[in-house]
Image (cartoon, rainbow, N blue to C red):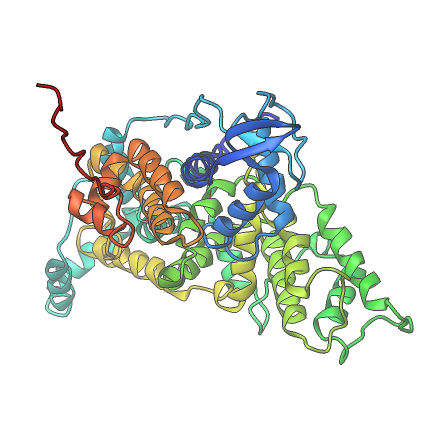
Amino acid sequence: MESRPGAPGPYRATALWNEITKYFRAGMPLRKHRQHFKKHGSCFTASEAVDWLHEVLRNNSNFGPEVTRQQTVQLLRKFLKNHVIEDVKGRWGSENLEDNGVLYRFPSTSPVKPLPSSKENLENFSGDKERLFKLPHLSRRAFKKHELLQSLENLEKTNPDIIEKNKEDTLHRKEISQEYVQETWRNIILIHLQTILGLPSLEEVLQPTQIVPEYVMYNMTNTSKHGVVILQNKSEDLPHWVLSAMKCLAYWPRNNDISQPTYSGFERDVFRTVADYFLSLPEPLLTFEYYELFVNILDLLQPHLERIAVEALQICCLLLPPPNRRKIQLLMRMISRISENVDMPRLHDAMGTRSLMIQTFSRCVLCCAEEVDLDELLSTRLVSFLMDHQQEIFKVPTYLQVAVQDHIEYMKMAQCKYPKEEICAILPTYSYCKQITPQEFEEQKVSTSQAAVAELLENIIKDKNLSVKDKKKKLKQFQKEYPLIYQNRFPTTENEAMLFENKPTIKQPMLSLRKPRFRSLRY
């Protein structure tokens, strides 16, 4: 499937794929297996791989505890298809893998996928930043804050003749147009997002043309008392029967807006009605266009970065078309209430209510226009966070509106002092991201992967199920693959030896008796 023009490619997903495949190859325990009276070395069964990888994904901040065993099997199938693994006969290319005792091994070739190349070199970022911080139609003269305040203080002391002259000049100066206001919205949003995400450039995740100021302003101003977007065009809204079904489930059993009498299993049928509607939508609620943007936020879904992730999602959800924002907001409110409702009967025989909500709706919330191997795992992680923080995420960030208003007022006052000159727009003062060099960017880009690999090393060290022999083998393999990280953990041989101090690596020599010398009896 071809990408739509202007939509960013799955850059982050590819990087995450590379990270998890490297992690899997470096950490998956290998041992000898016997199959059909034949021994196979350095391999593993499919079930062993599912056990190990499932635990890794559940503890990884990019995926979280919501990952199911079946999703892990599906990821291993993608590994087999993309030659991350192969069976012991060297076969790969299909997704014919089950949770069983079939043997697999790692091929000698690298499974790393090439990252999509940037459209421009990072060295051009300084030029991009100038265009970002300098709004169109304005140039040359810049004011300092004290100059602006001084000019306002002098307005009362101004000579009447000068005031009259300024009135005439005011007729000739440009009025602040609606287009300029929209451009201000676009630039302030870009600045805030770049600051929150900590990226040297938003080029890979969001283009300025993807920000539609009309959507942002509508989503901030046309809301109900609960903060839900109200649509003027009712044809774009959810059908009445879907809204009634969602309301029935959200307030079960206190509010049943459906006139039909209930019966055993009624709530399951209502839930399936809602699920079928959302799963039949032609595009995910977060849209194909913003896929890369939301995937990048997954890096922030960690306990110590929770507030930053909420703030980033607040802004990103404002970019959605109003019908999409309304639908996802109502959906998150519904599944959050259902998950917390102790009176709700079980909606699935084998799956808990929370897991059912996440697994059912993840694909209709986030997915890529192109097939991406980690799509389902990424979407379940994001939906889990959206569901848990939906009240905060869908609050209107009024500070954006204040920032735009302050900037417009600044421009109006600046034009009063210099009506005939074009004014250089000074955007509101924030803590902007510091420009970094391409080398620093490359170092930061791999920092997350290095932290994950370092965590893997600690898991190998602390794994009590590994024999000393297997642990030494894994550490030797790790040292070969990641020598710098290994050296950082074990700077000296003494540090390494302490790991096995209770089980010496060198066996003590056995007690040996000197062979007695006998003298010959012959003379």
Who is closer to the viewer here, 241 or 376? 376
Q: Is residue 34 left or right of residue 492?
A: right
Q: Where does the N terminus fall, quadrant-wise?
A: top right
**Relative to residue 374, is residue 97 drawn left or right?**
right
Of 364 and 173, nearer the camera is 364
Q: Residue furthest left?
A: 523
Residue 301 versus residue 153 in the image, above or below: above
Tell whether 474 sits left or right of 75. Answer: left
- The location of residue 248, given as percent across then percent down, is 77, 71
Is the residue 228 above or below the residue 487 in the image?
Answer: below
Residue 130 can be seen in this image: no
Task: Identify the residue at the far top of this view.
Answer: 523
Q: Residue 384: x and y, percent? A: 55, 59
Residue 289, given in percent of the width and then of the height, sits at 53, 39
Q: Nearer the viewer, residue 347 or 279?
A: 347
Which quadrant of the rendered structure holds the C terminus? top left
Quarter location, residue 341: bottom right
**Circle count:** 0
Name the quadrant containing residue 118. top left
Q: Residue at x 11, y 27 (%)?
A: 519
Whether 343 is drawn above or below 523: the answer is: below
Asked if residue 66 can be seen in this view, the reply is yes
The residue lying toward the viewer, choosing from 495 and 429, is 495
Q: Does residue 27 appear to the left or right of 243 in the view shown? A: left
The picture places residue 241, in percent across and down from the top left corner, at 81, 61
